[in-house]
Image (cartoon, grey):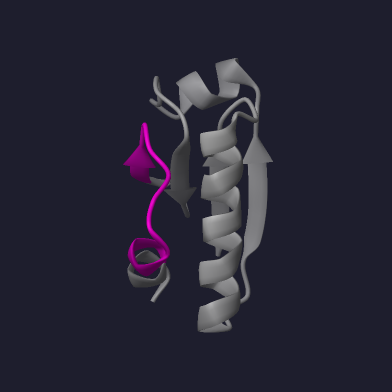
Amino acid sequence: MEIKVCGPGCASCEKAQKTVEAAVAAKGIEAVIVKVTDFQEIAQLGIFSTPAVVIDGQVKCVGRAPKQSEVEEWIS
Protein backbone atom coordinates (compact mmCIF):
# COMPACT_ATOMS: atom_id res chain seq x y z
CA MET A 1 0.00 0.00 0.00
CA GLU A 2 1.29 3.46 -0.89
CA ILE A 3 -0.01 6.51 0.94
CA LYS A 4 0.88 9.98 -0.28
CA VAL A 5 0.51 12.98 1.99
CA CYS A 6 0.49 16.05 -0.24
CA GLY A 7 1.34 19.55 0.92
CA PRO A 8 4.12 22.12 1.24
CA GLY A 9 4.87 21.36 4.89
CA CYS A 10 2.46 23.69 6.69
CA ALA A 11 1.10 22.85 10.14
CA SER A 12 -1.99 21.15 8.68
CA CYS A 13 0.19 19.07 6.36
CA GLU A 14 2.36 17.96 9.26
CA LYS A 15 -0.80 17.04 11.21
CA ALA A 16 -2.07 14.99 8.24
CA GLN A 17 1.26 13.14 8.03
CA LYS A 18 1.27 12.33 11.75
CA THR A 19 -2.36 11.18 11.59
CA VAL A 20 -1.61 8.85 8.67
CA GLU A 21 1.45 7.44 10.46
CA ALA A 22 -0.58 6.86 13.64
CA ALA A 23 -3.38 5.12 11.73
CA VAL A 24 -0.95 2.82 9.92
CA ALA A 25 0.73 1.94 13.22
CA ALA A 26 -2.62 1.37 14.96
CA LYS A 27 -3.79 -1.00 12.20
CA GLY A 28 -0.43 -2.77 11.97
CA ILE A 29 -0.50 -2.48 8.18
CA GLU A 30 2.60 -2.30 6.02
CA ALA A 31 2.48 0.88 3.99
CA VAL A 32 4.92 3.20 2.29
CA ILE A 33 4.15 6.76 3.33
CA VAL A 34 5.42 9.35 0.87
CA LYS A 35 5.43 13.08 1.48
CA VAL A 36 4.75 14.99 -1.75
CA THR A 37 5.75 18.67 -1.62
CA ASP A 38 6.18 19.41 -5.34
CA PHE A 39 3.20 21.52 -6.45
CA GLN A 40 3.41 20.25 -10.03
CA GLU A 41 3.21 16.63 -8.86
CA ILE A 42 0.34 17.49 -6.51
CA ALA A 43 -1.55 19.21 -9.36
CA GLN A 44 -0.99 16.17 -11.61
CA LEU A 45 -2.88 14.14 -9.01
CA GLY A 46 -5.82 16.51 -9.49
CA ILE A 47 -5.30 18.18 -6.12
CA PHE A 48 -5.51 21.94 -5.84
CA SER A 49 -5.91 22.34 -2.08
CA THR A 50 -3.67 20.91 0.62
CA PRO A 51 -3.23 18.94 2.74
CA ALA A 52 -4.41 15.92 0.80
CA VAL A 53 -4.15 12.16 1.29
CA VAL A 54 -3.90 9.73 -1.63
CA ILE A 55 -4.05 5.96 -1.03
CA ASP A 56 -2.96 3.66 -3.86
CA GLY A 57 -3.75 6.37 -6.42
CA GLN A 58 -7.17 7.29 -5.00
CA VAL A 59 -7.61 10.78 -3.54
CA LYS A 60 -9.25 10.31 -0.15
CA CYS A 61 -9.07 13.74 1.45
CA VAL A 62 -8.42 17.27 0.15
CA GLY A 63 -8.06 20.60 1.93
CA ARG A 64 -7.97 19.29 5.47
CA ALA A 65 -6.16 16.92 7.78
CA PRO A 66 -8.21 13.73 8.16
CA LYS A 67 -9.16 12.17 11.48
CA GLN A 68 -7.27 9.03 12.46
CA SER A 69 -10.51 7.03 12.43
CA GLU A 70 -11.08 8.07 8.79
CA VAL A 71 -7.62 6.96 7.74
CA GLU A 72 -8.03 3.64 9.57
CA GLU A 73 -11.27 3.06 7.63
CA TRP A 74 -9.57 3.85 4.31
CA ILE A 75 -6.69 1.44 4.91
CA SER A 76 -8.76 -1.45 6.26
Residue placed farthest to the top in the image?
A: 40
> Which quadrant is the C terminus positioned in?
bottom left
Residue drawn at x 43%, y 44% is 65
Instruction: Look at the image and tell me in which quarter the N terminus lies.
Output: bottom right
Residue drawn at point x = 57 percent, y = 16 percent: 40
**Residue at the front extreme?**
11
Residue at the spot 38% in from the left edge and 58% down from the top edge: 67
Residue extent of the magenta highlight = 60-71
Q: Say if residue 11 shows up in the picture.
A: yes
Report if residue 2 is visible in the image. no
| Image x and y of residue 22, in percent | 57, 68
Pick whichever, 59 or 17, lies toward us: 17
Question: How many numbered discs?
Answer: 0
Q: Which of 11 and 53 is in front in this view?
A: 11
Please tell me in which quadrant of the rendered image residue 75 appears: bottom left
As drawn, 35 above or below 32: above
Point 40% across, 26% down: residue: 47
Q: Where is residue 20 in the image (x, y as percent from the top left)?
A: 53, 59
Residue 66 inside the magenta-drawn segment: yes
Q: Is residue 38 shown above or below 52?
A: above
- Residue at the bottom extreme of this rendering: 28
Where is 54 relative to 28, above or below? above
Q: Which quadrant holds residue 53? A: top left
Q: Which of the 4 quarters of the picture holds residue 61?
A: top left
Residue 34 is situated, as x and y percent measured from the top left of the image, at 66, 47
Q: Is residue 8 above or below residue 70?
A: above
Left or right: 57, with 40 as reference point: left
Query: Is 40 one of the magenta-colored residues?
Result: no
